[in-house]
Image (cartoon, rainbow, N blue to C red):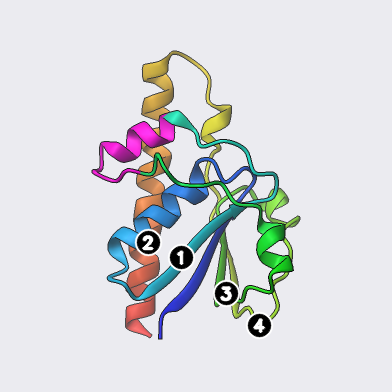
Amino acid sequence: MKTKVLFLCVHNSARSQMAEAYLKEYGNDNFEVESAGLEPGILNPIVVEVMLQEGIDISSNQVNDVFDFFKQGRIFEYVITVCDAKTAESCPIFPGMVKIINWSFDDPSKFEGTHPEKIAQTIVVRDQIKQSIQKFIQELDNN
């Protein structure tokens, strides 16, 4: 049976999208993965660009509202917030959920500077998320 995982952040435009994409990429079909936001926005084009550098195209991904998932009664074994801890406190509690995990990453939508500077800052976050996903998979494999 697949492990159901939801990645959650504020706008579902960057961090949660990257986490979802990496778990789909590295999870060897062992996971049912979705992502959502508290206030869904639009997909961050810089995030799309840095994920393409990894050979992962998220340009056609939808942004999702976590409260729609909640109303639909979706059940997840893991809800992983990828926003700061204060924002994570606003996340709804899902019935039947086994574990909430918080991974705190900087928000690419708040990065300032030139396009290349924003790309560089987003790559740092992307790589942190990638490492967290690989560690998560490894920990589950060891249990």
Amino acid type at image mark 3: Phe
The kind of secondary structure element at disc 4 is loop
Residue 3 in which image quadrant: bottom left
Q: Are marks 3 and 1 in contact (CB under 8 Å)?
A: no
Q: Which residues are magenta?
A: 46-57
Residue occupying image coordinates x 42% and y 42%: 60
Residue 68 in which image quadrant: bottom right
Amino acid type at image mark 2: Leu
Q: Are marks 3 and 2 in contact (CB under 8 Å)?
A: no
Q: Which mark is residue 84?
A: none
- Marks 3 and 1, the one that precedes in the sequence: 1
What residue did someone put label 1 on?
33
Amino acid type at image mark 1: Val
- Marks 3 and 2, the one that precedes in the sequence: 2
Rendered view: 18 above or below 46 = below
C-alpha separation, residue under disc 4 versus residue under disc 1: 16 Å
Rendered view: 53 above or below 84 = above
